[in-house]
Image: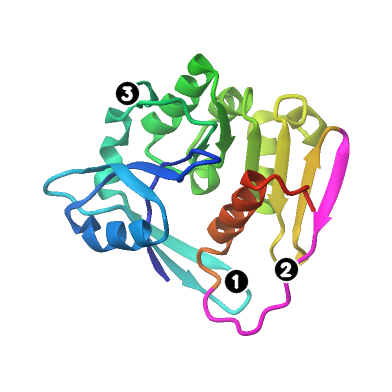
Amino acid sequence: GVAPNIAYSMAVLGEKPRGMATVGEDFGDYRAWLDSKGVDTSLMKVVPGLFTASFFASTDQASAQIASFYPGAMGVASTQSLKDLDRKPDLVIVSPNAPDAMMKFPAECRELGINYLYDPSQQVLRLEGHELARDMECAYFLFCNDYEFGLISKKTGWDLKHILEHVKVLVITRGKDGADLYTDDKEFHIPTVPEDKIVDPTGVGDAFRGGFLAGYAHGFDWT
């Protein structure tokens, strides 16, 4: 699977969701598709001479992946700032991005008093324990898969109980075993939806987060 990596996105709940990222000269078709789905792309900054960041995944039948990545325009993501926005968002999604941007945006959320969803995903491998701990400290949501959760725990020295002392809502996806959500001393298990046909698992985690946030924005309960 090949996917454009719009490395940093922002959701304004209750309104049209807005995406914010540095993108490449090839972004035109992606912009048209996002616009057609109701996403505000006005904050997407096109960087001349570069292409949009791209993720390439080679996946076997057990859903094990080998990933390669072209950062492209993502490399200058930290030139953008939440402080330049015309209005304060209800929730910011901090997804895998250039390391300096992944440090900047959570810091700005904390400074501005904005709730954020921390989704370090593939960048868990390159982030140090103190960096992960710093940006989980005030996160409203933490999303990760079970492999990433293991790495986060190892790097920070924080077990599940410790993480929940710093994060309001923790969601761990577990592949074929569904997902688990932890909040307010409660645990919820979310089973998988039976598939009609398996085509390509690339992007399933992103789709899960998108669906989760759509439900959250509509005020649904956790299950």
Please tell me how many numbered marks the rendered image carries. 3
Pair 3/2: label in front:
3
Q: Earlier in the sequence, mark 3 or mark 2?
A: 3
Q: Would you place residue 113 above or below residue 202 in this image?
A: above
Residue beneath label 3, please?
Answer: 84
Magenta span: chief secondary structure: loop
Q: Looking at the image, which residue sits at the far top?
A: 111
- Return the x and y of residue 55 as percentages of the image width and height: 38, 59
Pair 1/2: label in front:
2
Q: Looking at the image, which residue sits at the far left?
A: 49
Residue beneath label 2, please?
Answer: 176
Q: Would you place residue 206 above or below residue 140 in this image?
A: below
Question: Which image quarter is the N terminus in?
Answer: bottom left
- Return the x and y of residue 3 as percentages of the image width and height: 38, 63
Where is residue 118, by image quadrant?
Answer: top right
What segment is highlighted magenta in the picture? 185-200
Q: Earlier in the sequence, mark 1 or mark 2?
A: 1
Q: Would you place residue 74 above or below residue 202 in this image?
A: above
Callout 1–callout 2 Cβ contact below 8 Å: yes
Mark 1 lies on a secondary structure that is loop
Instruction: Give the alpha-carbon distance from disc 1 to disc 3, as whole Å.
Output: 40 Å
Q: Is residue 148 visible?
A: no
Instruction: Give the alpha-carbon distance from disc 1 to disc 2, as whole Å.
Output: 10 Å
Decide if residue 104 is on the left or right side of residue 59: left
Decide if residue 131 is on the left or right side of residue 5: right
Instruction: Give the alpha-carbon distance from disc 3 to disc 2, as whole Å.
Output: 41 Å
Label annotation for residue 63: 1
Pair 1/3: label in front:
3
Q: Amino acid at mark 2?
A: Lys
